[in-house]
Image (cartoon, rainbow, N blue to C red):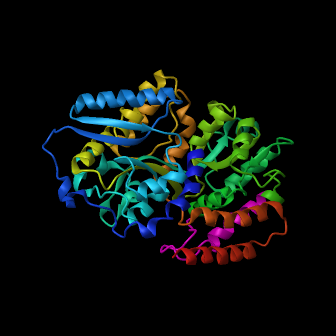
Amino acid sequence: MKPRNLAILLSAGIALAAAGCGSDAGTTPDAKSSQGSAAANAPVTITVGCKPPKNNPKEAAQWDADVAAFQKLHPNITVEGKDAFPCIVPETFQAKLAGGEMEDLFYVYYTDVQKIIAAGQAADITPYLDSVPALKNIRPDVISVFKSGEKIFGLPRVNYSTGLVYNRKLFTQAGLDPDQPPKTWTDVQAAAKKIAALGPGYVGYGEYSAGNTGGWHFTSSIYGRGGDVVTPDGKKAAFNSPQGKAVLENLKQMRWTDDSMGTKQLLRWEDLMRMMGSGKLGMMIGAPDVVKEVNNTFKGKFDDYGVAGMPEATTSLSGGDGYMFNPKATPDQIKAGLQWLEYKFLTPGQGQFNFERAKADGLPVGLPDIDLFGDTEPGKKILELRKQFATIPVEHFQPYIDANSAVQFKLEPPKAQEIYAVLDTAMSAVLTRQDANVDQLLSDAEKKVNNILAKSS
């Protein structure tokens, strides 16, 4: 979840120079007569951002091994990885974009893609995509992140969608079936009451309401209920709706009527992670990587947790990252870069999906934390390999996989960080004030968000 939060925090800054950086929706390298295509198999070098840094030795070594194997298959291509942590630095990212100083293949968050396209800071790779067989199997809602009209400007590396993270051990202690996690918000409410009844300190359901994380989870909840945060044209708030009211009313009832959310509120990202790791929190909204973070940082155990789909959801808040191409890249660099991306990130059993190697290297295998292909053949193959080489109980995450096969991914709203700050107020109010007026909270938030969107348009 840390990279996601960083993505949210960075998204507002990417737009600062957009107005002055060009109006074309990207650049088509074919149009650059001075950069014509070289002869077939001519030597070509590509620079690629976001190589794992040296302080992540296992994944850095895997990257180097993949580069060596790829270059053996393509002797004319030299891949120069640029290691950095973090992969995006807000103080330099936009300046590098505006100055055309990015790598030939540069790393981006989903939330920044459309701003980059609108500013003409990425190459149109559509003419070269016939060389990427994996493209036809990528989920349409994932590849749409990189589209403007019929043109495509990048490829995904990782994506996530939110679900319901739950403590299987607490479910068992509370007399609940951990293999049958909640499917509706009524189920969540009932389970939370039973978990809270285990005794002092136990919290059935936890929620954020500070540091803009409350607004982020409000967005996840309203998406799951079929609502929206802004109108389709991005010009008006859309959360003052029956779905938005349901989000706040449900939390208010669990907090004050059921007493299943604990007394400590105004929680931020780390608070729920710590509570989940301590074994005292029953449920929270999150993606499968929450379990990894709880295990790695907050001393939880993979065996104790599971992830289900968002209750009642046909749409889920999603995010992720991928690669776009520098407008200065030549056609041959783009072709070579596409071959590298397919090898490293889009092929079952290879690169990031080489689960046999990950297991041998002592890395956790089994979390369904990347879903680029849905229910297609590559998607099925990846699930099969993930299960074959799993080092954690994959069956604990099957409800999430089953639910997500029918869920559409949906990105964060424009001006996300500013909107989340406004919605934090509504979330914190219903969790700290028993007399909070939900209708008034939504109305006040609507006016503030409309003002934010008006200024940005």
Q: Percent position (x, y) of residue 105?
A: 36, 47
Closest to the observer, 135 or 117: 117
Q: Percent position (x, y) of residue 420?
A: 64, 63
The stretch of residues the image draws in magenta is 226-254
Is residue 169 at least partly visible in the picture?
yes
Q: Is residue 233 left or right of residue 445?
A: left
Q: Percent position (x, y) of residue 172?
A: 71, 36
Closest to the observer, 386 or 293: 293
Closest to the observer, 345 or 398: 345
Residue 46 lies in quadrant: top left
Residue 392 lies in quadrant: top right
Residue 235 is a magenta residue:
yes
- Specify the farthest residue to the left: 39
Is residue 257 at least partly visible in the picture?
no
Q: Is residue 120 left or right of residue 286?
A: left
Q: Is residue 151 above or below residue 105?
A: below
Residue depicted at x 56% and y 68%: 228
Residue 253 is a magenta residue:
yes
Residue depicted at x 38% and y 37%: 81
Q: How many marks?
A: 0
Residue depicted at x 84% and y 69%: 435
Residue 49 lies in quadrant: top left
Q: Percent position (x, y) of residue 377?
A: 33, 42
Q: Is residue 432 above or below residue 164?
A: below
Residue depicted at x 71% and y 53%: 207
Q: Is residue 191 left or right of residue 111?
A: right
- Specify the farthest residue to the right: 200
